[in-house]
Amino acid sequence: MPAPARPWFLYLIECRNGAWYAGISPDVEARYQAHLAGKGARYTRANPPLRLLGSRPFPDRASASRAEWKIKRLPRERKLAFLLDAAAMDAGA
């Protein structure tokens, strides 16, 4: 019997330049530490993170990737709500 699928997470980071960076990972804390160490995404190497704003679990990588695609197209004022509000996610915000 295969092991249960490990959840993936959508996360949002506030960067030093004031921008918000969205990404996905099965281990948010390890990924955030990589961003802090300058070993994360190219964007966060150029714009170091200040803090992790939040994260949200998804059952698999595909659904986390779809959510990342959606959140990156939202205006800044709706991103945090999209990340934290289950109703917004379910409605496809």
Image (cartoon, grey):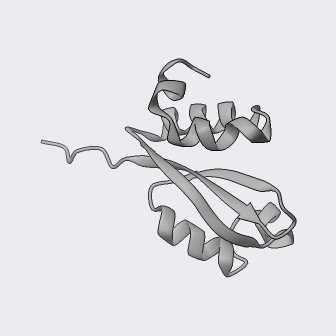
Residue 87, how many percent across, how many down? 47, 25
Q: Nearer the viewer, residue 58 or 56?
A: 56
Q: Nearer the viewer, residue 47 or 38?
A: 47
Q: Residue at x 77, y 65 (%)?
A: 15
Quadrant in which the N terminus appears: top left
Residue 21, how many percent across, how many down? 73, 54
Quadrant in which the C terminus appears: top right
In the picture provided, is 15 more to the left or to the right than 24?
Answer: right
Residue 34, how many percent across, how many down? 61, 74
Q: How many labels, in total?
A: 0
- Among the 4 quarters of the image, the one containing residue 92: top right
In the picture provided, is 57 more to the left or to the right than 53?
Answer: left
Residue most extreme to the top: 91
Residue most extreme to the left: 1
Q: Residue at x 19, y 43 (%)?
A: 2
Q: Residue at x 53, y 18 (%)?
A: 91
In the image, residue 23 above or below residue 30: above
- Among the 4 quarters of the image, the one containing residue 86: top left
Q: Residue at x 50, y 62 (%)?
A: 28
Q: Nearer the viewer, residue 40 or 13?
A: 13
Residue 43, how many percent across, how many down? 81, 61
In the image, residue 60 above or below residue 22: above
In the picture provided, is 86 more to the left or to the right than 59?
Answer: right
In the image, residue 86 above or below residue 79: above
Q: Nearer the viewer, residue 23 or 1?
A: 23
In the image, residue 7 above or below residue 66: below
